Image (cartoon, rainbow, N blue to C red):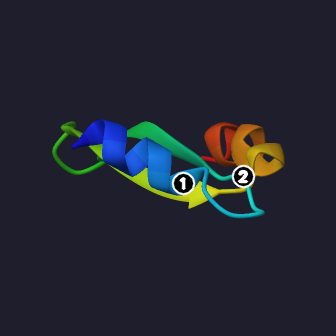
Amino acid sequence: MAKKSVASLQTGSKRLSKAIKMVKSPKTGAYTFVEAIMDPSKVNDFLNKK
């Protein structure tokens, strides 16, 4: 399944990256995962944003 997902992101004229960030909930202290598909140049901004 993961191979199909990665392969479909790189088809066509655009190159996209999938970024996954772990975020801690202020209420419970549990961690959740935030996923986003974006242009590779914007990945560092996404990961550095709180």
Q: Nearer the viewer, residue 43 or 10?
A: 10
Quadrant for residue 30, please give it: top left
Residue 24 makes an appearance in the image: no
Q: Nearer the viewer, residue 49 or 8?
A: 8
Q: Residues within 10 Å of mark 1 (few under 14, many from 20)?
A: some
Q: Is residue 31 left or right of residue 35?
A: left
Quadrant of the image containing the N terminus? top left
SS label for mark 2: loop
Residue 1 makes an appearance in the image: yes
Q: Residue at x 78, y 50 (%)?
A: 42
Amino acid type at circle 2 is Arg
Where in the figure is residue 31, as x and y percent of width and height? 25, 37
Q: Is residue 2 left or right of residue 50?
A: left
Q: Residue furthest front?
A: 12
Mark positioned earlier in the residue sequence (2 or 1): 1
Disc 2 versus disc 1: distance between alpha carbons?
7 Å
Residues marked 2 and 1 touching at CB (< 8 Å): yes
Where in the figure is residue 41, as x and y percent of width and height? 83, 46
Q: Is residue 3 left or right of residue 38?
A: left
Q: Nearer the viewer, residue 8 or 45?
A: 8
Where in the figure is residue 10, as x and y percent of width and height? 61, 50
Q: Residue at x 47, y 45 (%)?
A: 7
Q: Is residue 35 left or right of residue 9?
A: left
Q: Residue at x 75, y 61 (%)?
A: 14
Q: Which residue is mark 2?
A: 15
Q: Residues within 10 Å of mark 2 (few under 14, many from 20)?
A: few
Amino acid type at circle 1 is Leu
Q: Residue furthest right?
A: 41
Q: Which residue is mark 1?
A: 9
Q: Nearer the viewer, residue 14 or 42?
A: 14
Q: Residue at x 16, y 45 (%)?
A: 28
Above or below: residue 6 compared with residue 38: above
